[in-house]
């Protein structure tokens, strides 16, 4: 049987970046509070994938808080969970991989996030660019 050719559906390249992310939930008094911590697997201009201890329902709108460097204030990203899948158990505990499509940034955070991704892309591709 002939094998189907792989067709990339993503608009943007994924950068494999491992950094802490905090999933925020709405607090009863109108604020936000940490719901869980996770670790990013990869990110792009419009999406982020992270590994967490719990699943999050597809279609749920969430807020993520990430710190691109130890010097910068955390960025608050808003998005929608597009998919969630259970990974194999790690040390007897289930882990979940969660894909989020980003759609809203707080004021000023969009430029910081895009700048961070551009910086990481430059670092990644610089050996191949001969600059």
Image: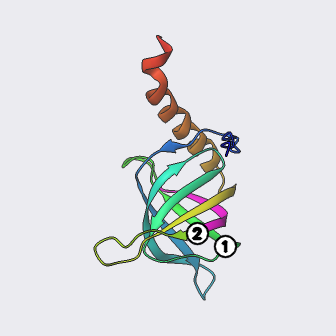
Disc assigned to residue 58? 1
Q: Nearer the viewer, residue 33 or 92?
A: 92
Range covered by the magenta-colored residues: 74-84
Q: Residue at x 58, y 83 (%)?
A: 27
Q: Nearer the viewer, residue 100 or 112?
A: 100
Q: Residue at x 59, y 45 (%)?
A: 44
CB contact under 8 Å: marks 1 and 2: yes
Secondary-structure class at tag 2:
strand
Q: Residues within 10 Å of mark 1 (few under 14, many from 20)?
A: some
Marks 1/2: CA–CA distance: 7 Å
* Residue 41 on the magenta segment: no
Q: Position of residue 112 (x, y in %)?
A: 57, 43
Query: Which quadrant would residue 104 be assigned to in this image?
Result: bottom right
Is 84 situated above or below 75?
A: below
Disc assigned to residue 84? 2
Q: Residue at x 45, y 30 (%)?
A: 124
Q: Residue at x 46, y 54 (%)?
A: 41
Q: Position of residue 111 (x, y in %)?
A: 62, 42
Q: Position of residue 84 (x, y in %)?
A: 58, 69
Is 52 situated above or below 9?
A: below
């Amino acid at each position: 049987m002939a094998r189907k050719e792989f067709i990339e559906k993503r608009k943007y390249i994924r950068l494999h970046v491992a950094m802490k992310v905090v999933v925020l939930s709405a607090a009863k008094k109108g604020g936000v509070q940490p719901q869980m911590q996770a670790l990013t697997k990869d990110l792009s201009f419009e999406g982020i994938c992270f590994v967490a201890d719990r699943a999050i329902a597809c279609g749920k709108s969430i807020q993520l808080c990430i710190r691109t460097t130890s010097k910068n204030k955390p960025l608050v990203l808003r998005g929608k969970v597009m998919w969630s899948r259970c990974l194999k158990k790690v040390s007897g505990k289930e882990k979940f991989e969660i894909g989020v499509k980003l759609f809203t940034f707080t004021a000023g955070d969009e430029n910081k996030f895009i700048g961070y991704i551009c910086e990481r892309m430059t670092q990644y591709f610089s050996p191949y660019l001969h600059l």
